[in-house]
Amino acid sequence: MPALALMTMFAYQGFEVVGVPVGEVRDPRRAVPRAVVASILLSALLYVLVQLVFVGVGARTSAAPLPDAAGLILGPAGSTLLALGGLVSMLGFNAGTALCAPRYLQALAEERLLPSDFALTHARFGTPAVAVIATTLVTLLLLFALDFDSLVDLAVLAVLVQYLATSAALAKLGRNRRLKLLGGISMLVSIGFGFGCEARQFAYFGVLAAAGILLALGTRWFSRRRGTPS
């Protein structure tokens, strides 16, 4: 059951990155909350409809259950159509990650937690070019070093830590008691999901987190040596 809950979180994650490029969005106070809520509701509706159809056609567990279920309804064309939909979905996820992940590095560089080069933007497009290249290289490294299951484990745990930190910030900085309570409840939920993680997940994340902490400390140290303000 805990492993199933973690896989469910992997399927629903992604809404939290909507606000990452907020500085490049028109009317962010209006657009970002709507985008977050809409992404969650539409994803939930899509998953519910898929499950209803899957159960309704009497499909069985297999190596490719959803294409097989589509094949029962529309024949081979249905399986092909669903496979193409899966490719489009993966492309969308990768595009969203490619957009948002470099912005994390850019923000960390602006806070002097990474070398300032990561905050440099492209002269023409205004994108964090160095951060984009670095993100691509790290992604390729992880792709060749870990298998799919390990990458999913790492992604889920990283998102859990992000949720926990955000919830703790809300519990501490919330403008009223209701928001502080919401942050506390969210922290408990994140910790509860964390109990479903395995030792190898913590090991993978621990290695990467330790490397990040050492890099941040080294950047701070060099900044102070050079007299760069923190």
Image: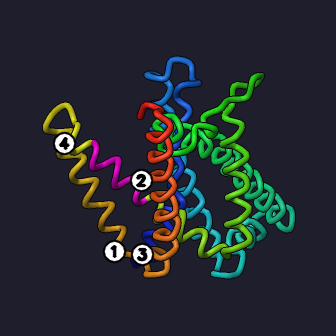
- At mark 4, the secondary structure is helix
Please tell me whether the stretch drawn in magenta is mainly helix, strand or loop: helix
Task: Tally the marks.
Answer: 4
Q: How is the image coloured?
A: rainbow
Local crowd at mark 2 within 10 Å, few (<14), some, or many (≥20)? Answer: some
Crowd tier of the residue under label 1, counting other residues whose Cα lies within 10 Å: few below 14, some 14–19, many 20 or above: few
Are discs 1 and 3 less than 8 Å apart at CB? yes
- Give me the C-alpha separation between circle 4 and circle 2: 17 Å
Checking the image for residue 152, the label placed there is none
Front label number (4 vs 2): 2
The residue beneath circle 4 is 180
Q: Which residue is mark 1?
A: 195
Which structural element holds mark 1? loop
User: Quarter of the image containing the C terminus?
Assistant: top left
At mark 3, the secondary structure is loop
Query: Mark 2 sits on what residue?
Result: 162
Is residue 40 shown to the viewer in this render?
Answer: no
Locate residue 126, reporting x and y percent: 69, 25
Q: Nearer the viewer, residue 89 or 199?
A: 199
Mark sitting on residue 197 = 3
Region in magenta: 160-169
Instruction: Between residue 78 and residue 215, name the one nearer to us.
Output: 215
Q: Is residue 14 left or right of residue 199?
A: right
Q: Residue 184 vs residue 114: left or right?
A: left
Indicate the amino acid at tag 4: Lys
For this view, does 120 lie left or right of residue 70?
left
Q: Is residue 77 left or right of residue 137?
A: right
| Cα–Cα gap, marks 4 and 1 | 23 Å
Q: Which amino acid, by three-letter code, is at mark 3?
A: Cys
Alpha-carbon span between mark 2 and mark 1: 16 Å
